[in-house]
Amino acid sequence: MSGTQKKLGARHKARKRAVDLLFEAEARDTHPVDLAADRVALAVRDDQVAPVPPYAQTIIRGVAEHLDEIDRTIADHLHEWTLDRLPAVDRAILRLSVWELFHTTDVPPVVAVDEAVELAKQLSTDDSPAFINGVLGQIVALADQVRAAAAATSARPAAEGRTPDTDSAGTDRA
């Protein structure tokens, strides 16, 4: 198999589907989680509609949940550009990758960046892969700090004798 014909795995295909839906949701001014849910239901009824893999749904929910933080991070690392001036597909790719960098523990940062560059090669302009690589190259340095802070925050209730389903006295809220 040549270098230009890489075998694309299930996660890559899920990322591509997530980018497609994030792009479409922005273009249609609709919430991406709602659009994904509609597509999941439609794919069940119509085999002409591409399915939405579970990992794509996870990405879409994650990007939607953390969109403000993700967009601030991207905007802070754009030089002589603004987020709204970027091609919409590049915005979707960057959002996906920043979410993976900051909010997943099973995707190594190098993989998140490599996947974003590969998606840009497939879906965007000739200049986009290098541009996306440059932006993410700056952001990747923050990934360990953000992941560590998130882990500390999620560990705090357990360290205090609580779980997310108990109150400060340890009483079950469910």
Image (cartoon, rainbow, N blue to C red):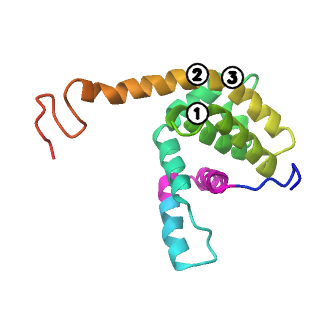
**In magenta segment, residue 32:** yes
Magenta part of the protein: which range? 9-35
Circle 3 SS class = helix
Above or below for 108 versus 53? above
**In magenta segment, residue 74:** no
* Viewer-closest of 24 and 42: 42
Instruction: Indicate which disc residue 138 carries.
Output: 3
Q: Are marks 1 and 2 in contact (CB under 8 Å)?
A: yes
Instruction: Name the spot of residue 154 as percent of width and height, x first.
Output: 35, 30
Displayed quadrant of residue 14: bottom right
Above or below for 89 versus 131? below
Callout 1 amino acid? Leu
- Circle 2 is placed at which residue position? 142
User: Which quadrant holds the N terminus?
Assistant: bottom right
First in sequence: mark 1 vs mark 2: 1
First in sequence: mark 3 vs mark 1: 1
Instruction: Name the spot of residue 27 as percent of width and height, x first.
Output: 64, 53
